[in-house]
Image (tube, helix red, strand yellow):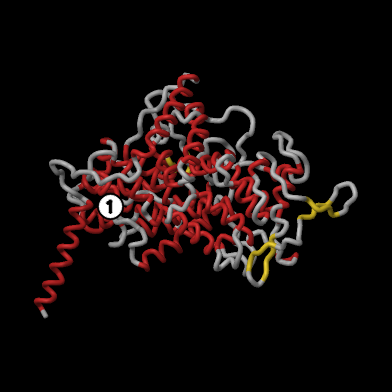
Amino acid sequence: MWARNLLFLGLVVAGVGALTAALFPRPTRGPSAPAAVEGAADVRPVVERVDAAFRELWQERELKPAPTAPELAVGRRLALGLMGTIPSLQEIRDFEAPTGDRLQAWLDAILRDPRFNDYFAERLARAYVGTADGPFIVYRRRRFVSWLSDQLARNRPYDEIVRDLIADRGLWTDRPATNFITVTVNQADGNVPDPERLASRVSRAFLGVRLDCAQCHNHPFERWKRDDFQGIAAFFGQVKTGLTGIHDDVNAGYLMEDRKTGEKVKVEPGVPFLPDLVSDSGTRRERLAAWVTHPNNSYFARATVNRVWAILCGRPLVEPVDDIPTAGDLPKALDLLAEDFVAHGFDLRRLIRAIASMEAFRLDSAAEHEITDAHEKSWAAFPLTRLRPEQVAGGVLQAAQVQTLNQESHALVRFIRYGTLNDFVKSYGDTGEDEFHDRGCTIPQVLLVMNGDLVKKQTEKNLFNAATRIGWQALDDRAAVEAAFLCVLTRRPTPEAAALFEGRLRDTRGDERSARMEDLYWALLNGTEFKWNH
């Protein structure tokens, strides 16, 4: 019996030692060689053209760009924009091991990570079906988001995904793309999908145009007419629900009330621009889907680039994200990326790689010279944006662990994380569909982070929390402070901060040391720096 106990104790000690060596390494002579980077060279031509376009813009506006941001700062942007969380200490150690273009290697690893598929699917779903629960029975939002995640995991061409959303048929459980249609069902009016809500979603989410502003009258600022909006809505006039799910009734049509006579008038499908791209074959919805995603429909590619840019950077190239002007000068980068997106088969991962590889994405948000609004609007400095609620919660939960919280974590850990994150977002306040609106942080939100259960439970003395484990496992005070900064802020402390916090930890043991580490963690999580993307 004693031999087995001794063996078990030895295995535990060896495991703790291995983890400590990995997360708190001693200096080594040299890093290992980098792993191969998938797709990095492929985007270089378009990245060079976009970089040149931005430099030309900065020169015209006499703006001195900010310097290149530290690698870890860019890595944090990638993790927040693509996975909704900050990098773990484990990921940071892995990132810093190789030489070469480590950011490209990190980006490639993120795009293979299931967390990217799930998070990016949720961000896209907000534009497609909103955030509300929708009509009971005929709408399954979670099933819809899971389906989107699966399409992203396959790297399915984006135009194919959108065509399914607009034109698919069947039950919302078996054919999850049809939830794009069923979310608009009015159960009090015969379970009929709403053509006008669908027209609004299509124009905003896929074309970057607010055609619904012309729903009742001609658009006051753009060239859109009421007939333009009604023509798009008419493509959905035949869609119905039934025992077999979503289907099209060729004998039905879209009726609009005549404002003069009050009579119902049948409206034929029509598009507000590029009518030559509309096919004569297929159902009405299939014809609309083919027109929306046509390679020659520049609105579709521009809208996609603008939204993906916004998700990565926290701010779109053109604001608002779903209302790209039809007249006036647009950023040259928008058209360059849109053309590349079309030329390479609407490949979303390629588009993400291109944006993340650009000079503008990798600039710092601060500089020795003054950074003004003009710098941020021209992307001569990376714009500061507040973290979204799920990014705050995801960041706190990950900072409280030295190892990565992902699909390989224990099922109980993932279940607790899911519940904690949802509870926090509900209390903090969801940003809803208008997710890129620059709102200030409210006092209740600040107090929730400072005094709420989320931060308290993730920093208190507990062998499962990073604050306690770092204080116990770190090789010395300096390593403990550095590990805490890396876990929470994805950077190392300044010499002044290191000296301050090392002094607080010096000669402490046991409960006193754990309490000091808890204070350090609490201070970092409640600082302004943690709550912003920069």
For the point 78% across and 42% down, which residue is it?
217
Give left or right: position of 489 versus 138: left
Q: Confirm whether residue 248 shows in the render.
A: yes
| Viewport quadrant of the C terminus | top left
For the point 40% across and 23% down, which residue is it?
369
For the point 75% across and 64% down, which residue is it?
189
Residue extending furthest toward the left: 3
Name the residue nearer the viewer: 391 or 449: 391
Q: Check disc 1 and report the residue beneath it.
A: 90
Residue 279 vs 136, above or below: the answer is: above
Residue 101 vs 243, above or below: the answer is: above
**Amino acid identity at mark 1:** Gln
Give left or right: position of 142 versus 455: right
Q: Secondary structure at mark 1?
A: helix
Q: Confirm whether residue 429 shows in the render.
A: no
Image quarter for residue 51? top left
Image quarter for residue 312? top left
